[in-house]
Image: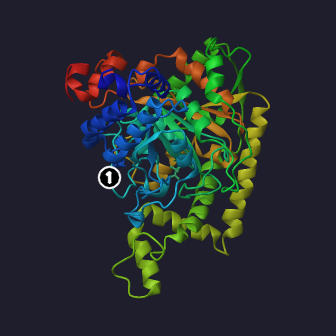
Amino acid sequence: MTNAELISLSLRDAAAALRDGRTTSVTLCTAFLERIQAVEPKVRALLAVNPESVLAQAAASDARRAAGAPLGDFDGIPITLKDNICAKDEQCSCASKILKGFVSPYDSFVTGKLKAAGCVLLGRANMDEFAMGSSCENSAYQRTANPWDLDCVPGGSSGGSAASVAAFETVAALGSDTGGSIRQPAAFCGVVGLKPTYGRVSRNGLVAFASSLDQIGPLSRTVWDAAAILDLIAGHDEKDSTSLPQQPEGFAADLEAFEVNPRLDGVKIGLPKEYYELEGMDPAVKQIMNDSIEVFRSLGATFVDVSLPHTKYAMACYYIIATAEASANLARFDGIRYGYRSPNATDINSTYEKSRGEGFGNEVLRRIMLGTYVLSSGYYDAYYLRAQKVRTLLRRDFQEAYRLCDFLLTPVTPAPAFKFGAKTDPLQMYLSDVFTTALNLSGDCGISVPAALDPGTGLPVGIQLIAPAMEEKRIFRAGRAFELARARKEFIAPLCCRKGCKRETAGPQAASAFVLNRKEACGHEK
Ligand code: GLN
């Protein structure tokens, strides 16, 4: 297989190619390493890649296969990790200066699972500092570009994870989602992103932002791939007290059975009116939502209008609870135990003050101050306690809505990816999360699936499917049916290609050419 073919494989197809002997892990990983070298100067999705370690892991996988050892389905498959997920002996900076040079002494639960499955850890993905942001612009290290348009943000905070998948630098990635940080960048980059049910995936080894909201999940090329990765990383973990007891569900196997006749007859989809009435929603997103409704209708689903009456409080509630928890979680970065210590410190107080003041970026400082404020004795009842009560109401809204339908269909974001620097006002930036934060507050599961390209900008737009806790199967099936009903090739990012060029010619074949030699793919340069 050519490099171009290899890098555009889905997880499922890459696994099949390894199984059938059409490629090896070393060949596959080498193709990705070359791709990374070719496009990273432009995309800058990755904070660290260690080719030697990648090739050693790949060679070990090939040796296991050659020896006829019993192998998992994804042995030898490369995956990138958001830089807040610990992997033993690898950096874990959370894209913050305060953790510069920090090396994890242990594996997170999910990394342990990936290693046990024989996956190759390919690199550390850029992110907003401590996962606070919606554009990756809050990284202390570099600016990740959207592979669809290098002048636009990839979304955040898992923007490096999303961009690395969209730019064909990896087969798939893991990210974390506290208020939308997997779903939103997935939508901006035209890939699939899943926020699993709270407690489905252990948070052990994920650097905590807001512990009652954080969840690790996959970013991938297809819904099937996301399901297979969830199969790999889900499971009870006694080291995380919020981890749910659960049996393996075989999500990918379920989809394989479902694909024989991927119809949604008898399925009822709820349309929460508050999500469609938002002022300032981009007309293209509205149109794409309408078109997507028609796709689901053609698959046999029916629709019912539902209401989530407390939606208008979700953002405020999220920014109180998330900052409160963050202010407590980030207290451990004190300049003493690990990470950055200010050279200007003279005593214990100034060590704490200066190390934190110099080590954290502005957004993180803002959140710590907000969080400390809402938890302070004079304001606790007015803000934090009130927000907790609103959270219960929001959760009830969802439960009421689920009585009428199997899952909800909503936009992921009010508009496609925006330009760098377009949202300097923090409140404007926070509004990118209007459709995603409520789900973290409710603890249910949601998936972002590419729907169409905005005809104006050529940027991808996604749809969000939301289901009750532990009902990932429903949104996997619906997402898969939707994705099969649409041409997947539409979502091959024409990296660096001129706007408006014939993207439809960039099928998987051309896709390989596109990065390696963009001219061949589209006939012209930007
Ligand atoms: N963009 C949101 C925030 O800034 C969500 C972040 C996340 O999900 N990690 O808090």
Residue 361 visible to the viewer: no
Q: Is residue 145 left or right of residue 466?
A: left
Q: Which quadrant holds residue 100?
A: bottom left
Residue placed farthest to the front in the image?
67
Q: How dense is the environment of label 1, judged by Cα within 10 Å: few (below 14), some, or many (20 and up)?
A: some
Q: How is the image coloured?
A: rainbow
Instruction: Please name whichever residue, 257 or 278, is drawn nearer the observer in this view of the structure.
Output: 257
Q: Is residue 47 left or right of residue 323?
A: left
Residue placed farthest to the bottom in the image?
347
For the image, the number of numbered tags is 1
Judged from the image, the secondary structure of the residue bearing numbered disc 1 is loop
Instruction: Please name whichever residue, 244 or 305, is drawn nearer the observer in this view of the structure.
Output: 244
Q: Which quadrant holds residue 42?
A: top left
Q: Is residue 68 above or below residue 507?
A: below
Q: Is residue 139 above or below residue 490?
A: below
Q: Which percent across, then down, holds residue 161? A: 43, 42
Q: Which percent across, then down, holds residue 69? A: 52, 33
In which quadrant is the N terminus drawn? top left
Instruction: Please name whichever residue, 220 or 524, is drawn nearer the observer in this view of the structure.
Output: 220
Residue, x 40% and y 78% (percent of image)?
A: 354
Residue 178 visible to the viewer: yes
In which quadrant is the C terminus drawn? top left
Residue assigned mark 1: 142
Q: Which percent across, then down, holds residue 23? A: 38, 24
Q: Which percent across, then down, holds residue 60? A: 42, 40
Question: What's the amino acid at mark 1?
Answer: Gln
Residue, x 68% and y 41% (percent of image)?
A: 444
Q: Which quadrant holds residue 499?
A: top left
Residue, x 56% and y 58% (percent of image)?
A: 208
